[in-house]
Every structure is written in structure tokens, then in C-alpha cells.
Image: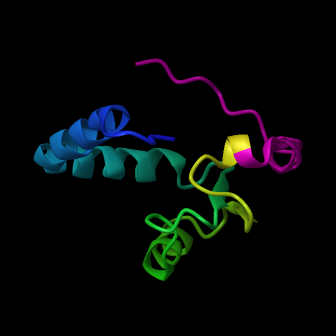
Amino acid sequence: MAPTYASRIGHATLLASSTGEREWLAELEERVDATLFDRPMLRVLGMRDKPLVTREFLAKWDEKYPHATKLDLPAAGHFWQEDQPEAVAGAIREAFATAPEIPHRSG
């Protein structure tokens, strides 16, 4: 985490710089949607990540990727991979065990 002012400077700088990148972020979102829509997908969320996990976010995700496998971790926060690594590893194995291999695209 970021317990001191000095340790939070990087976070603040990243967030401030991303506000000037709306056009690039919108283009990136379109490319991600076009590329991932029909691919096997696992969405993992730490439900204690209050800034991210909102009803609006979950509704948007479900609308965009209705076929995604979902893992909601009630006891995990933003760093869910650290909070519950065993649950995440198991979900990854299970979600992609039978997924078809996707050919590599160059370019």
C-alpha cells in the first residue's frame, strides 16, 4: 500500500497524467472490446476495493462481457492476488482448463 505522503506521489502522478489521455484510453477500450469479446475471460474482483467495485462498474462489465467467468472475493481488496492467491490460482486453472487455444496474432 502507500502509507506515507511520499509513497503516494507516484499514484497521484499516474492518476493526474491519465486524465489528459481520454482519447487514447477510449481507443484502447475499443480495441480491447473488439479483441477480447469472444475470448475466454476471467474477471477477478476484490469486493473490498470500494473505489472500483460499484454497482455501475459491475453492470457495465456484465453488459460488455456477459460470457466472462467471474470470481468475486468478499475478503479481498484492490490487491486480490496478494489477499487470496490460492483462490485466484484455482479460478485461473478452472476457467482456462478447457479453453480452446487461441492462435497468436502478430502485429
Is residue 83 shown left or right of residue 12?
Answer: right
Measured as percent of width and height from the top left, residue 80 is found at 67, 49
Q: How is the image coloured?
A: rainbow
Q: Residue at x 59, y 23 (%)?
A: 104
Using the image as rendered, state which of residue 21 and residue 69 is in the foreground. 21
Q: Residue at x 47, y 18 (%)?
A: 106
Measured as percent of width and height from the top left, residue 61 is found at 51, 68
The part of the image, by quadrant, that contains residue 100 is top right
Kindly give the residue lying farthest to the front in the view shown. 4
Using the image as rendered, state which of residue 63 and residue 45 is in the foreground. 45
Number of numbered discs present? 0
Q: Is residue 45 above or below residue 29?
A: below
Measured as percent of width and height from the top left, residue 13 is found at 22, 37
**The C terminus is located in which quarter?**
top left
Is residue 33 shown left or right of residue 71?
Answer: left
Kindly give the residue lying farthest to the left in the view shown. 20
Residue 49 part of the magenta segment:
no
Q: Residue at x 88, y 45 (%)?
A: 90
Measured as percent of width and height from the top left, residue 38 is found at 59, 54
What span is colored magenta in the figure? 83-107
Is residue 7 shown left or right of residue 67?
Answer: left
Using the image as rendered, state which of residue 44 and residue 107 is in the foreground. 44
Q: Is residue 83 above or below residue 62?
A: above
Q: Residue at x 61, y 70 (%)?
A: 66
